[in-house]
Image: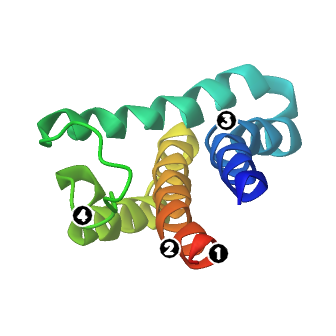
Amino acid sequence: MEFLLSLKSLVHYFLHFGLPLVIALLFYRSEWKKAFLVLISSMLVDLDHLLATPLFDPNRNSIGFHPLHSYPAIGFYFGCLLFTKGYYRLFFLGLLLHMITDFQDFYLWNFLLKK
């Protein structure tokens, strides 16, 4: 159980920070620092967590709860990914990767950690 909790944290932080770095290095080799910064800037979407009470609840699913993590917002991010170009598209990719990370963080790990 303790191993799975450690693995959960490792996967969570890899998906939030490591995967954007890999994407930046693989697809934006000449401007990887700028691409990485754009991807990481999408983490600002977590500012909507400040509207929640309590501020942090480990048993709460972010997806569908917080305004910027809502299903309409996710649809908007996906639409913008399809219809924007350049670094705007990269920003919306970062938002969608963030949503996938939060989704798996709740559903996958709750499934794996059930007793």
Quote the CA–CA distance across marks 2 and 3. 20 Å
Does residue 110 appear left or right of residue 12 in this picture?
Answer: left
Residue type at tag 4:
Ser
Quote the CA–CA distance across marks 4 and 3. 22 Å
Camera-nearest label, 1 or 4: 1
Q: Assign a secondary structure to mark 3.
A: helix
Camera-nearest label, 4 or 2: 2
| Image coords of residue 26 (percent x, y) | 87, 44
| Image coords of residue 77 (percent x, y) | 37, 59
Q: 94 or 15: which is nearer to us?
A: 15
Q: 41 or 99: which is nearer to us?
A: 99
Q: Assign a secondary structure to mark 1.
A: helix
Residue located 72% across and 52% down the image: 2
Quote the CA–CA distance across marks 1 and 4. 24 Å
Residue type at tag 2:
Tyr
Residue type at tag 3:
Phe
Residue under label 2:
107
Residue under label 3:
17
**Which badge, 1 or 2, is on the more N-terminal residue?**
2
**Which badge, 1 or 4, is on the more N-terminal residue?**
4
Camera-nearest label, 1 or 2: 1
Residue type at tag 1:
Leu
